[in-house]
Image (tube, rainbow, N blue to C red):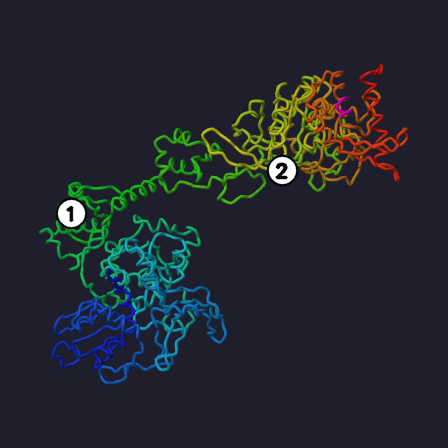
Amino acid sequence: MSQSIDFATISSSALSSADNLLAEWLPSGRYDGHEFVALNPTRADKKLGSFRINTRTGAWADFATGDKGGDLIDLYAYLNSCNTAQAARAIAERLSLGNFALVQKVALDGGNAAKPGKNARWQPIVPVPEFALKTMNFRHSFRQGERSEPVFTSVFRDAAGQVLGAVARFIKSDGSKIDLPYTFCENLDTHEKMWRWRGWPGLRPLYGLDALAADPSRPVLVVEGEKCKNAADAAQLGYAVITWHGGAGNWDKTDWSAVQNRRVILWPDCDSQHEKLTAAERKAGADAESKPYLDKYAQPGMAAMLGIAEQLQAQGCKVAFVRTPEPGVWPSGYDIADALADRGQLIDVAEALSWQHLADYTAEYAEVLAAAKASGSLKTAEPPPAPATVGEPPEGEARENMGGGGENIPETAETPEGESRYQENFDRLKREFSLIEGKSRAVSRKTGVEYSRKALVDHFCKKSVDNWFNWGRAPVMTQYEVNKLKRDRAAFQVAQDDDLKDMMARYVYLDGSSSIWDNQLWRMIDQGSAKLAMGSQFKIWQDSPARIVKRFDRVVFEPGREMSDEYINIYRGLPLADKVQFPRPREEMPTWWLDVLDLYPGCRAIQKLIAHLCNHDLQMMEFVYNWLAYPLQHPGAKLTTSLVMHGDVHGAGKSLLFEEIIKPMYGDYAATLGQSDLESNYTGNRSGKLFIVFEEIFNPKQKYDQSGAMKHMVTGKTMRIERKFVDSYEEANHINCVFLSNEEQPFKIEENDRRYFVIWPKTKLPESLRLELTEELGADGVLQFFMLLLSLPLTINYRRIESSDPVQPDAYEVIEEGGPRFDPHTKPPMTEAKANVINYGRYGWQTFYMEWERGEIENIPYCAAITGDVWDLYLWWCTKNNERQISKSKFLQHIASKMPRARRWWRLPNSPRPEEKMQDNIFLPPGTRPPQGTPEMDFIGPQVLRFQQAVQDLRNPKGY
């Protein structure tokens, strides 16, 4: 298979060396400006003038014969009577050899056509050789040592991806910017090769030729400047983004021939330049900004894009403009890079590039272009070369009448009135309608409505419709584009409908799930619920680009934290927070907690209720107050402890305190749950909660079943939220729990527990206090108590004196000032009620060990003992106390968790055989050590014997 020829790259490379090649092919030629004039060797040409080659574009023509071509490949084929493939190979081979002779440019009048400067002897090499890429460093000590590192660089490549050179932006000492071309060059005298700050000769290459060639079907986006192209590429907008080098005034010095038969969008810089001051005004010191703005279409950015549009349209392109406002509305020079950086504050980039928002060049800018050209404010590029073969435009593109607009349009109506109506209809069709590819139908780009040809005739007139269909320049849309236009139009209508706007604001799609957030109900709902709520409008909401979308994992419950708009924070504040009015400034509040209580007489009955529930124990009261106050003063704080109120006294007021007083302080962030809620696999009722009251959550058969779940709820940092038909997710656990029960043992509490503060109210709530509470709650007692809790100093004014027995209640002493602060990890004091619950919930082996350790088993010493003897004692103990025994291996393992177990030697030093040693598995009380100088075996032996004898006497009082 023969290798394909890259005509575009060879043509571009040949153009870069046009002067050298023409000097070899036509040595007698001379220069007339940028045109090379020579005698045509293919005929008897005797006078210079007819045969001309444009050294900027490569286009050539012999005006005497009519022969012409589009580039230097065509010229070589013409001069050497070969085909273009042979010509391209020959040129490529010559360019690869290099080593051109010095070109002496002679003007047509015989003078010197070019006066070489200091850089004239350096010739850029394109594409850049691979070895040279390693030395491409962009260092430049320009402007006498100003910034030598560029702000950014842009590497120019050809259609094959080969490097042609680069442009680097530098910041000068006065803060202005300068963009310098950077090419790999060869000195034509010394043949030295190096990187030079030098531009490309002739027409400059486009920046983005590689992107242009990568996908010929991709629409093209033309922006002004390398910075804008780089920003658009980074945003991955789905376009082949291109630009030119040199700013608005140099677009015509660029080779645009690579952009043929493409769909093109032009994004002009939104310049806001003023008319220039006159000499008299400058002399008078007039303010330049006092002058009126230049016309929008005379602004540099727009004028450049109009000139580009004219050239690209002549090359078979369908051209549209991004709509920009009048000068002065946006900051001067506002471009696509600014729009992307602003994230749509002035203009949404995706919306601006959508076809229904673009301005069609042919329909909306033809008159502007003509006026600009007539006024001289628009530059015209060199005529682009005609394509070697003109075929049909690519599928879906605009059909262009290559002979110019209007040739196929028949004569208009005979009367002036008919002429006027026809022209009005025809202009509207050109301005607002597009053909639908593959159909004899049209679509309104303004409304998205499709029309058959007959419907258009009924709406306009037959002559205007026929002429428009036969015009050949009407834009063409694919059915996909038509459908998208309809969807976008529906979205636009939604944006204007107040009811639909409310719907868009209410519902948020949670990306990565099938769930929806309801801003009105302020919770997550399933898709079925949303469909029932929205009805037929659900489909509109689902397809609308105006729909709010947030990531599923951005739904959080974070009280007290400011979250960005990317998040949905379920927490919205406590309901009573806005009503707080402290009796004195916070800094003047008492530091003794009992003094704070005196400041709020409006909740005196609630204070009495807490004293009643705590049996008037000041240490218990202080802990309860601090426990209730801390999460209200620090919203979202997760305490690692929990309150447990239980007992067989019904009507003590437990539920009254937490249901009627504490829960209203939390509003929607509080809940009451029961046994079924704890057992359920669905945990949605715990989501977004700060306070939960658990009422009688265990029945007698399940006291031990849910202890793990309870522990996690009290101290776990996160929890899994499961709802029916809604995706599960992880949520931060900010719940503080209270457990209420009327049983003596509500659930099992372990000996060394650090989670639960247990209270046993001993008396029923007096009727007089109940009446006081009813009256107080009917007023503003809850608000008063809320303010009281916010005012507490959160100090611990009672020092615990812990008992050596872990299940004995702590004693306490008063610390009048300087006490430690209460925090989420403050350990709850041991109370008599907690000790009773621990004892009640012990396993049999635990009770056995506790009684043995305390010496409560008849005449049995707590000392070193052989494991078998301890097992025998346990069997006797179980029989006596009607306890269910466990297996020997499990029992011994449990006791080993309390006492070290090891195989040890022992002997009886005072026996008749003091040297006789024995070895057994022996339990040794923790911390036991023999006296100094006494062997361990002699220390253990008497204890082992004493324990054996005591057990034997206990099991067989009469002896064996």
Classify the position of the N terminus by image quarter: bottom left
Q: For the view shown, which residue lies furthest in the top direction?
A: 958
Tag 2: amino acid? Ala
Q: Main secondary structure of the magenta part?
A: helix
Tell me the distance, in whole angstroms, between the alpha carbons under discs 2 and 1.
73 Å
Q: Is residue 45 visible?
A: yes
The dot on residue 465 is 1
Q: Residues within 10 Å of mark 1 (few under 14, many from 20)?
A: many
Tag 1: amino acid? Val
Say which residue label 2 marks.
637
Nearer to me, 265 or 873: 873
Q: Residues within 10 Å of mark 2 (few under 14, many from 20)?
A: many
Q: Quadrant of residue 686?
A: top right
The residue under the point 56% across, 39% down is 558
Name which of mark 2 and mark 1 comes first in the sequence. 1
**From the viewer's perspective, is 122 left or right of 727?**
left
